[in-house]
Amino acid sequence: MNTILVGTQWGDEGKGKIIDILSQQADYIVRYQGGNNAGHTVVVADKEYIFHLVPSGILHKGKICCIGNGVVIDPAVLESEIRAMSSVGVELDGRLMISALAHVIMPYHRILDQLREKKGTHKIGTTGRGIGPCYADKINRCGIRIVDLINPRVFREKLADNLKEKNEIFKKVYHYPGFEFSAIYKEYTRYAKLFSSNVCNIALLLDRAIKEKKDILFEGAQGTFLDIDFGTYPYVTSSSATSGGACIGTGVPPVSIDKVIGVAKAYTTRVGEGPFPTEFAPKLSEIMRQKGQEFGATTGRPRRCGWFDAVMVRDAVILNGITELAVMKMDVLDGVKSVKICVAYTYKGKIFKEFPYDAEVLRSARPVYQEMPGWGKTVNKPRDYVELQPNAKAYLSRLQDILGARIAIVSVGSSRDDTLFISA
Ligand code: IMP
């Protein structure tokens, strides 16, 4: 079975935990887009692990973890994650494979990302990791790929070409001194040596795995509404975070995909700038932020919080071909008097039942809510779906009806045990 796991909101839905659980059944776990802007948190035996680049399935012995061509790789981050894994006794021995075609984040990408954000006229609220500039170079056909990095002659040539043009731009547009060839060349040649034995043709590796009937789990980063095409542009990331990205970002053909699972938080959060129709007023936002520990796993930034937006998530179900959903952090809503679900928007007297792609409409859209009674604080954590409080079950059942996909998993806490499975 080849399964894609995607976020249905603005990222941070809790995908890391579901990937960790589903990884137990998978043979291969594959990242297909994004880079170290992502942060997947996994809690095992009370110990928290945060992954930015390496698929979180690496915690499971014997699993092959792949970084696909659609990912942008900051080698310094990859090195530190590999070292961190070794230091806690997770052995990689041939289990981490990197696509030769993945693009490399260079120091000038990071700095450009930060300078553009500082300039501030069109601030996106990026993670400042160089993601956008790296993808821009990829599309502009001047990027440096892993296959280029491990070939000293090609790397030298491409780096020199890039610096020639970019240093001019840095100096003239950003009044930034620019970059020295030799320091970057030395640093990145060291990475090339470090990773070269992990580099391979991921498309062929996965083709072989499919022919051998192995199970592959494609691990999406960010979320549907941060997708470069379908997200709330320009307040998006620079990659294809929807399920289609799994094929583009690995070379696995669409006909080989069996299932798409969507992950949604029981409410909504967003980091960075951009429209957010169901956002709470500041006081409630702060209460929920503290309760749900809504701080970015990558940058530590406080996340904006709001009610569940079913218009958005229903759109995500359609865009991704989701048939099953995992609803996360239900426990954070425990003790809330009444809960609200956004079922439509109004704008200039008109009702919108579908997600509006016009940023102008979305910015001023007012949510139409269905209000439902909340449920009390949980004394004993439910260990089975039937043990959930009746009003919590009613909330999930209403979500399922609106979203048009089966809720198969409900999470009521951060550990693996706090996961309820609902059979079909
Ligand atoms: P970038 O991906 O760093 O360019 O940031 C673009 C937008 O995507 C910003 O609003 C970020 O906060 C958001 N973003 C990027 N990665 C994540 C993520 O993993 N979770 C949530 N938001 C993210």
Image (tube, grey):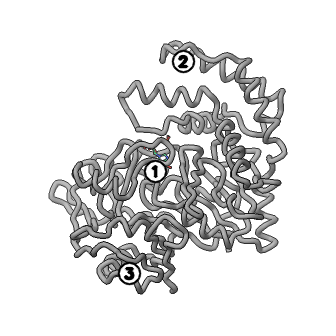
Residue 228 position in % (x across, y down): 49, 48
Nearer to the camera, 289 or 315: 289
Q: Is mark 3 within 8 Å of ligand 1?
A: no
Q: Is mark 2 within 8 Å of ligand 1?
A: no
Residue 123 horizontal side relative to residue 158, left or right: left
Residue 94 horizontal side relative to residue 408, left or right: right
Residue 50 position in % (x across, y down): 57, 51
Provide the residue designation for mark 3.
388
Q: Residue 386 appears in which quarter of the rendering?
A: bottom left
In front: label 3 or label 1: 3
Looking at the rendered structure, the secondary structure element under dot 3 is: loop
Provide the residue designation for mark 1.
226
Provide the residue designation for mark 2.
170
Asked if 421 appears above or below 249 in the picture, the reply is below
Q: Which quadrant of the figure contains the N terminus?
A: bottom right
Q: Mark 2 to mark 1: distance in Å?
A: 28 Å
Residue sitting at x 20%, y 55%: 347
In contact (CB < 8 Å): disc 2 and disc 1: no
Q: Mark 3 to mark 1: distance in Å?
A: 32 Å
Q: Give the amino acid type for the residue marked by disc 1 in the picture.
A: Leu
